[in-house]
Image (spheres, rainbow, N blue to C red):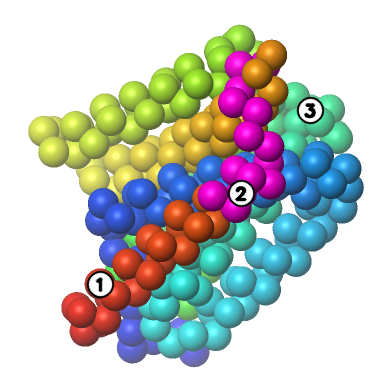
Amino acid sequence: MENQTFNKVAKITLIFWLMKIVATTLGETLGDFISQTLNLGYYVGISVTAILFLIFLAMQLSVKKYVPAVFWLVIIGTTTFGTEISDFIDRTLKIGYAGGSSILVTCLAVTLFLWYRKHRNLEVYPIFERSKEMYFWIAVLFSNSLGTAFGDFLGDNLGFSYFNGAVICGAIILVVVLMHYYTKINHILLFWIAFIFTRPFGATFGDFLTKPLAKGGLDLGTLNASVVSIIIISVLIFIAHRKHLQEGA
C-alpha cells in the first residue's frame, strides 16, 4: 500500500538523539561481540546481523504506524549490521577504512539523490509513504555503516585514541546543534550531518569501553558493554513509548 494513514517514524527530539547514540554504541559492541569475541569471523557476523536486520525491517514494514520498540529495533539492526558491513569491507576485502568510507559515502549520496528525485524533499518526519520509508531505512543503513568506517579511520589511520575520536565526533555534533539554533542553514542537511556523526561517536565510544587498557580502552568487554547498552536503550524505549501514548499519536 503506497499511501499510509499514519506516520511510521520517530519525532526528532532530544530523546531521539540520546537513543540514537546508545543504539550506535550497542551496534558497535554487539557487532564486535559476534564477530570478534565469539570468534565467528566477519562472514558469519555479516550473515547473522543481516538476518536480524531483515527480520526487524519486516516487522517495521508490517505495522501501520510508528511503534517505538519496533522502530528502534530496526535502528539497532542497522547499527549492528552496519558495523559488520564496514568491518567486512575494510578488513576482509582489504579495501581499508578510507576506501570503505568512500564507497559508503557514495552509496549514501546516491540513496539520498534517488530519494529526493522521487519525493522532492528529504524530510525524515513525518513519513507516510512506503517508498519514502524504504529510502529512509536504506539511507540509515548506509549512514551507520559509514559512521563505523569513519570512526575506525580516526583511530587507525589518523592515530587518535578511542576517547579522543569520540570527543572529535561529539564536538562536530555540538557544532551542528549550534548551527541549527543560530544559523539559517537547511535543517535537513544539518539533520543528516548530525545523524551520520552520531554513528562514529557511538562507534569510538563503544571501542573506548571495550578495548584493552593498553590500547586506550576501559577493557569492559564487548558482552558487558552490550548488556549495559541494552538496559539503557530498553529504558529509553519505555520512556519513548509512554510519551508516544500520552501524545495520543
Chain part drawn in magenta = 215-228
Lower position in the chain sequence, tag 3 or tag 1? 3
Measure how far apart labels 2 and 3 are at the Cα level: 28 Å
The magenta stretch spans residue 218: yes
Picture residue at 75% right of the left edge, 24% below the top? 96
- First in sequence: mark 2 or mark 3? 3
Mark 1 is surrounded, within 10 Å at the Cα level, by few (under 14), some (14 to 19) or many (20 or more) other residues, namely: few
Q: Is label 3 in a helix, a strand or a loop?
A: loop
Q: Residue 248, image x and y in percent?
A: 21, 84
The dot on residue 226 is 2
Residue type at mark 3 is Ile
Separation of residues labelled 1 and 2 (CA atoms)? 25 Å
Residue 98: image x %, image y %?
Answer: 66, 23
Residue situated in front as seen by the camera: 160 or 237: 237
Compared with residue 55, is residue 42 higher up or lower down, i.e. above or below?
Answer: above
> Which is more N-terminal, label 2 or label 1?
2
Is residue 142 visible in the rendered image? The answer is no
Residue 154's label in the rendered image is none
